[in-house]
Every structure is written in structure tokens, then in C-alpha cells.
Image (tube, rainbow, N blue to C red):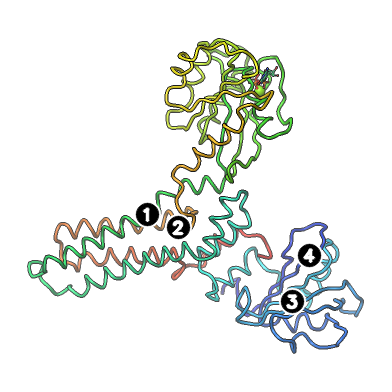
Amino acid sequence: MSRFELDDTIAAIATPAGEGGIAVIRVSGPGVFDAVDPFFISHENKKLRDRSANTIHWGKFTDPSGLAVDQVLVSIFKAPQSYTGQDVIEISCHGGLAVTRKILGVLLEKGVRHAEPGEFTRRAFLAGKIDLTQAEAVLDLIRAKSDRSLEIAACQLSGSLSRAFKELKEKILRLLAHMEAYLDFPEEDLEVDVKAGMQKQFTEILEKIRSLLSGFERNARLREGIVVALAGKPNVGKSSIFNALLERDRAIVSELPHTTRDHLEEPLEIGGVYLRLRDTAGLISTPEHPLDKIGMDRTLETLQESYLILDVIDGSAPLDETDKHVLSQVPENKKKVILVNKSDLPLRIKMVELKAFAGKQPLIRLSAKTREGFKELEESITRLLERGAGSEGEQITRLRHQKALEATLDALLRAESSFRKKTSFEFITPDLHVALGSVKELIGEVYSEDLLDVIFSEFCIGK
Ligand SMILES: Nc1nc2c(ncn2[C@@H]2O[C@H](COP(=O)(O)OP(=O)(O)OP(=O)(O)O)[C@@H](O)[C@H]2O)c(=O)[nH]1
Ligand SMILES: [Mg+2]
């Protein structure tokens, strides 16, 4: 028997723990009125059960002895017009720890079960109110840390990704039906345009899957935060730029080299994108002090983890071998921008030399002291991050989507290759069924309890 019986009535505090203006206790299930009515007293003395759906009522919530716990507003939703598709009551009370716990406690004593994380949304899924990708979008929406990830989650919640997956399913179904209709035809009797039509269907489906897959890595980065590192030799002003971008004195700055020993990370939003900006220990060719060696190893790790590296040099001093050494440590596959810092001081590097140093990398002169050039830096970062952005609607956001789409792609590639080899259709259609099965899992048309456990365990309690 599942832990998630729908006959149970469940309750949880839906707002964060702590003090606040209000807090909400959410109750869902067939027994909501039996659970709440005995403790809710409105001045008209009417039972909540007898009120119309989608109405809000003011009154007192009492404990079993009749003692008032709080003045509350109670919202009533009746099945199936509610978030979970069941009868739902939401009790808005004052946002204090004791009051919320007391109200929840009274309900639990009355036989209501404390909801598991994400159980309300799980019920919404089981009631067919939303599909799996929409349930995942609920979580992404709650966790969104930037405008971009919010846009993607909101689009997904409105069903745009589900539509893309459903279209894919329809396309595979059509191809399968097409092939099954010709199962009894010998290969040589098939008309040329029938075969050309099938090939076209294969090509379209494969293109669609590949385009969905290509956006994945980028989206995962958008959600988790894009790591951007400041790197360079000691004393060029990395920590000063770090502070200037954050607009506060987060990192220690001093005229002594090797001030920064360990990397620091802070969140930052630029161009609507959530970044994890890292300051690092300065890199030199041959560290002597053991602490410098440890700091530099950490910097090299950070460079590996970064999506974008801001390579800082000091424009007020000639370029030297250490600057070149730093650049050579930056992994080839990373996006780079060269920052020529201290533009408030006279430039001591020749332009030709600078251009040769930067190569194809964008080069920006700036000053952490006066903030000259920072607007250009932010625009340059935004441009680099926007490259490759697709439409928000059809962006896959999870490893689960990627794995299921890859399984679909594998099965379709096998089917297409057999088709090209003129294999009899009866040996091709099983692969198309496999592809179809993976897409159905993606949408949640077929699912296992284990899969639901994995998805909903990430949610907070009360959602
Ligand atoms: N004039 C001027 N001085 C700057 C600028 N940026 C940094 N400095 C100075 O350069 C020195 C080193 O700055 P930091 O920000 O500590 O340099 P860093 O690259 O983090 O150095 P390490 O942590 O030791 O690797 C400090 O004395 C800063 O005040 C700038 O834009 N203009
Ligand atoms: Mg520093």
C-alpha cells in the first residue's frame, strides 16, 4: 500500500517557519470539513461544509476545549476545483510559530495526517490537474533565483514544455501507425512516396529531440547559477573588482600581494541571469609558500568549474611572464574576457601588446576604483550568456528530461537505421514502441511510485 493514500486528509503549514504577517495552513482530502468545522466559529454560526466553494470566511479557530487560538480567515475550495483536485481548506492565521503549530496540532489530533514534502502537488498530479513537467516547474518556480530562471519555470508551469513533449509523442505515434498500416506489405511493393514520407517523419522527430536536448546544459546552469571567476596574478585588483561588482566590501583588499588565499563566492544577478561570482587567490608560476600553493590549487579547481573567466591584468604595469602564465592556465573550452584594470592610472602596456595578449577574447579597460568600464563589463557578460538562448517555452530543465529524451533518441536512431537498411517493418516498430514509452514517462502518462518519490521529495512540506 502506498504511503500516499488519497483517502487520507492531509495538512501542513504552507508558509516558511518563523515570524511573519500571516501564515497559511493547508488541508486537503475528503475529510477537510470534518476536521476543521468543529474548531471554526464564525459569527453567523454556519458550518464551513454548508458554504459555497471559492469563498473566504472570517472567524475564530479554537482548541478542543473551545479556547480561542487565533482569529483566522478560512478559504474553501471544493473538489474538483482546487489545487489538489480534492476538497481543500486554507487557514490564514497570524504568522507566529506557536499559533501555526497549535492549529496544525489540533487538526492532527483530529486524525488528519501531516503531509509529506510535495504531497499537495503530488495529489494535483494524480488528479490530472498538472502533468509531471508542470509539477517540476512548481519547484523550479519556488527556487528561481533570477528573472531568466523564473521566466523558464513560469513557461513550463503554463504547460509549454508539456505541449512540446506531447507533440513529440503524437509525431512518434503517427509514424508508428503509418508503419503498422504497412506491416503486411512486402518491402518491394511499397510506393516510393510512402517511404519518402516515413523518412521525412523520422528526420523531423530526430531534429525535434536534438533541439530539445541541446538547450539542457545551458538551462541546468541557469538554474544552478553560472560560475564566473576572477583570475589573475596577485595584486592586479581581482578582489577590488569582485567588491565593485557586488557593490559592497565583501573581500579583503590590500596593497600586499597574496591577500586572497581562498576563493570566495557570492550570488549576483546580471542581465536577469543568476551568477555565482568567485574571487580567487592570485596565480604565479612557482609558488614558494605552502599556503600560496594551496590557494593556487583552489584557483585552478575554480577555473575548471567556471563557465566564464574574467582574466584580470594590471594596466598600470607592464605585461609580464606571470600574466601570460595565468592566461595559459585557463582551460581552452572556457569563455574568457580580459579585464585591464586600474584605468584611473596611466596605461603602461602598449596597445599592440595588449591585442596580441587578448587574441580573440573581448578586452575591457576598467577601474575598480572609479567604476569606469563596469557598464561595458556587465553588457559583455550579458552578451556572452545570451548566446545560444532559445525560447523559454521549450527548454528542458532536468536530468530526468535529458535521460528520457536520450533514451527516445537512441530507440529512434535504431529504428531509422533499420529503416534505411530496408529491414521489414515488423522489426522496426518495437523500437518505435520503446521511443513512445520513454516520451510517455517524460510527460508522466506512465510512472512509478519511485519516480514520484524522487520528484516530490525535493519539495518543501506544504507545497
Ligand atoms: N588605482 C587603482 N588601484 C587599484 C584598483 N583596483 C585595485 N587597486 C589596488 O590594487 C591593490 C591590490 O588590490 P586587490 O583587489 O587586493 O588585488 P587582488 O588581485 O585581489 O590581489 P591578491 O588577492 O593578493 O591576489 C590594492 O592596493 C587596491 O587598492 C584600481 O582600479 N585603481
Ligand atoms: Mg584578492
Residue 306, labelled with which disc? none
State how far apart marks 4 and 2 are (Cα).
35 Å
Disc 4 residue type (three-letter): Ala
Q: Which residue corresponds to mark 3?
A: 75
Q: Within 8 Å of ligand 2, the CB of disc 4? A: no
Question: Which residue position holds label 4?
Answer: 23
Which amino acid, by three-letter code, is at mark 1?
Answer: Glu
| Label 2 sits on residue | 394
Residue carrying label 1: 406
Q: Gap between marks 1 and 2, in whole Å?
A: 16 Å
Q: Tell me if label 3 and label 2 are in contact, CB under 8 Å.
A: no
Query: So how many labels did they put on this image?
Result: 4
Marks 1,2: beta carbons within 8 A: no
Mark 3–mark 4 Cα distance, whole angstroms, equals 13 Å
Q: Give whichever of discs 1 and 3 has the lower sequence position.
A: 3
Residue 433 drawn at (x, y percent): 31, 67
Secondary element type, mark 1? helix
Q: Which of the marked residues, 1 or 4, is nearer the chain's N terminus?
A: 4
Depth-wise, is mark 4 or mark 2 nearer the camera?
2
- Mark 2: amino acid: Glu
Q: Which label lies toward us, 3 or 2?
A: 2
Q: Quadrant of residue 317?
A: top right
Choose between 291 and 160: the one closer to the eye. Answer: 160
Mark 2: secondary structure: helix
